[in-house]
Image (cartoon, coloured by chain):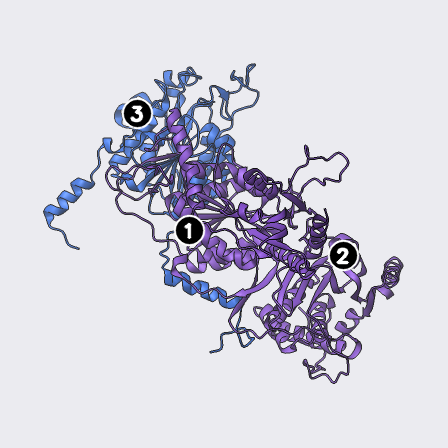
Chain colours: A blue, B purple
Amino acid sequence: MTLEATDCLVKLYEEHHNLEDYQGGVPRWCTGCGDSGILTAVQRLCRDNDLAPERTVFVSGIGCSSRLPHYMKTYGFHGIHGRALPVAEGIKLARPDLDVFVSTGDGDCCSIGAAHWIHAIRYNMNMVVMLHDNHVYGLTKKQASPTSPLGFKSNTTPRGSTLLPLNPLTVTLGVQNVSFVAQAVDWIPELLYEILAAAYKHKGLSFVRILQRCPQYLPKMFDPWLQDPQKSLILTHDRGVRPSAGLAKIYRNQQEHDPSDINRAREIASLEDPIPVGILYQNPDVPRYEELRNAGQLRTADYIKAGLEAEFDKFTIWPDGHDAPAA
Amino acid sequence: MNEVLTSDRPKARAGEAASAKKVVTLDETVVEIISDSGEGAQRCGQSLGAIAAKSGNGVWTVEIIPAEIQPPARSVAGASGNRIRIGSHRITNGGDEADLVVAFNEQVLLGRVRAGELKPGCIILLESMWRTNRNAAIAESYVSTHDQLVKAGYRVYEVPLELECRKLVKDPRKGKNMFVLGMLCSIYSLDLELGREQIAIAFGKKDHKVIESNTALLEAGFAWAEANLDLKYEIPGVPVTAPRMVMNGNTALALGVLASGMDICAMYPITPATSASHYLSDCFEKVGGIVHQAEDEISACAFAVGASYASKCTVTITSGPGLSLKQEAIGLAVMAEIPLVVINVQRGGPSTGQPTKPEQGDLFAAMFGSHGDAPKIIMATSTIEDCFYSVITARKLAETFNMVVVILSDANLATAQQPFPRPTFSEDWLAPPLDQAPVPAGARPYDWDPVTGLKRRFIPGQPGGMYTLTGLAHDRDSHVAYDPAVNEESHRSRSLKLAAFQRTLKPPAVFGDTEGDLLVVGWGSTKGAIEEAVTRLRAEGRKVGSIHLQFIQPMASGIKEIMQRYKKVMTVENNWSDDPKDEIINEDNRRYGQLAFILRSRFLIDIDCWTEDRARPIKPGTIVAALRAKLAQ
């Protein structure tokens, strides 16, 4: 098919999308919730990459974070608690042509869905996984999560939580086949966007932990980092992200880090103060499960019939009493 | 691998032996071959079944499987092997007690004797090497067991299996089974050439020497039996006029998945379902399908739901405990109206129960397992052939009604082999290509039809169809809705779909007398045994009939009318029900078999049940006794 130049322009215009094309329902998150910043970054990402809304699927589990698909105007799948990753994997294996994003919270991913988290990293399917980590269960009203700080007083830990928090970055970096790990914070929108954009471009499972404020149940949790930019270590690299000149003036604590260095990535992941912000690890060469399994093959009726008849032959008794068809 | 030590091969073939033995013609017979795990009794039994099927006999084989992979040698609980029922007519179940048993040691044999699996006077061919075992305890155990069995009236033949096989191979442990196969070919007048063919198939992928040495053992066994045994039977077969296939239920399920046009099976290993996935893993990818082994049962189901949502209907295969784990994701598929096929190969429960043994214990779990009102289609397979076609039907139903369809098979069908007519491929079996056309303006993702509850499914990739699916209560736009009227409407729509499908079902066919004294109602793998029991009772002049339900939810119209034509109605099920004769059991506290419970609540008829829960297939003779007792009440 050939198109006139003007038709091409019209087509380009038609296929171009604005921010509104990705905006679904009005978010019902609390005022000041970090999820809003993530939603904004994601919508911008879709627009800047001109993703076709009908070929984009946002998958989530259960929790505040998992409402995100409802606020997109793409296809969305708001499933069950902890199972966003298996659902997303099923979608991607069935339809490798779709762009898949996953929103999951610290309870959804690191607690009830922890088994799936580990294995999703192993599968390394091409999708962006956003861990909305606010250190608390919000939707069920303030229970301690696996990433809650030690001593956190919640409805299930009224005398303070007794366990040290789990570190999602070190866990992820410890799993075989890990291919992309980054950390962003909701209060630096520029880097949040840049990191998500890099995650989208990466071919493989991009795991982005996003530290996120919960003004309702942990209002002061991130105050020290908001008040003191030195407490954030900005990871910079040509193959990672670089803050703009303006941002660099505020966040002066920067470190050049080569994202291909997994040992250094693991050291950085373990830092508690300052916290790293940027791309910790990236390896574009890790095989992707959907490609290893040859997903998305065209299967015609003749193709299936031929395979089926060949299998039937293995079990068939022909009228002459022998195993092969009488030729 | 065995090495051939001698080339001194007998050339015996059926009919060639210059034997003057009297040939006894049988209508049917039940043979068991049992050994320690790893001695090849399974392969021997399956080969015998295949040879008989090729000879035009009706065949049903039952695997005898210990729960452990390597149970201790010579243990009563470690019996591994096969039961083969061979007949002149179509055989639909494993039958009653065995007529002839080949045992590789006396301990595994004792296991079968104690389980009541041998007919009085049963012929026993017993490996005799233990008599002279250097371990005095073993020799003593053999001798005393042997004497005990002879005393009990069994016809025991001591066979020097080890001694004879050692003439041909270094390690008879891996070869006795083919010697035994040769013996059985002689005893049942089966064509030895078919035995040779079977060896070529079984060992086809291996070294040619393996085929040669096994063939030598087969021939030696045949010659030994011809020369040393006074046993000669013939079970006339009916010539095969159309191609038939012989396989077990799990293989048939896997082929059904292939034939249904589904693209993906997501599973997690669990007994006894896994062999279906094993075979599917082998054959599915040759035609572009994928078997995804997930990290757990929950993930397998959620994965299948995700794949179904974005593409064609997907299948997940499991057994009891796995079904329990999948229930939440099944509920999501029900709520969001995503097509999904769940195959549950039932095993003994509850909990880990009896993983390798049959039970029909998951009907309630399949129907009511998810929380809330979660209507889904429940169907049960009753023959090997049925296992194949059920999957094709289930896929179609799932996509037509955007529903979850649960197929209940069980460990009995999973491992039983039976011939059935080779299916003729039809393109109608396959799922249509994905609809990727733009969604018409104004169409909504949950536009429930007010009469049928049906709605059109939007598939990612369809322009204009973008919506966010949710497991929360939702309105026609798939928006989260807490409105009471919307909640009611969505419940009603999901429920109506079952009724809409139910209107297309025909009443089940009645087997036996269409009216009379007793109607037996069954479901699943008990069909063959029930119908055989009905046939035997009718031969005694009793007015008995039976129906077997393929769909348990929804249930076809006309069942009540059928029931009303009989004086008594009783289900026969392989699951638990309280015995009314137990001291503290009465009508107020008696728990019924699962199908009986459902029928009683639906039809308000005083339907009785007779159930057996011995974690083995129910024998037709046992059913006959139960029906007689019911008729006598």
Q: Amino acid at mark 2?
A: Arg
Q: Nearer the viewer, mark 2 or mark 1?
A: 1
Task: Give the quadrant of residue A56.
Answer: top left
Residue A165 horizontal/vertical position (percent) = 52, 25
Is disc 2 in contact with disc 1, using a CB cutoff of under 8 Å?
no
Q: Is residue B267 left or right of residue B487?
A: right
Q: Amino acid at mark 3?
A: Val
Q: Nearer the viewer, mark 1 or mark 3?
A: 1
What is the chain identity of the residue bearing mark 1? B
Q: Amino acid at mark 1?
A: Lys
Same subunit under labels 3 and 2? no
Same subunit under labels 2 and 1? yes
Q: Is residue A160 left or right of residue B30?
A: left
Query: Rounded to the nearest whole Å, what is the CA distance between mark 1 and mark 3?
Result: 38 Å
Q: Which residue is mark 3?
A: A26
Residue B5 horizontal/vertical position (percent) = 72, 77
Is disc 3 in contact with disc 2, using a CB cutoff of under 8 Å?
no
Circle number at residue B112: 2
Q: Earlier in the sequence, mark 2 or mark 1?
A: 2
Residue A145 horizontal/vertical position (percent) = 50, 24
Query: Rounded to the nearest whole Å, what is the CA distance between mark 3 and mark 2?
Result: 69 Å
Can residue B293 be seen here? Answer: no
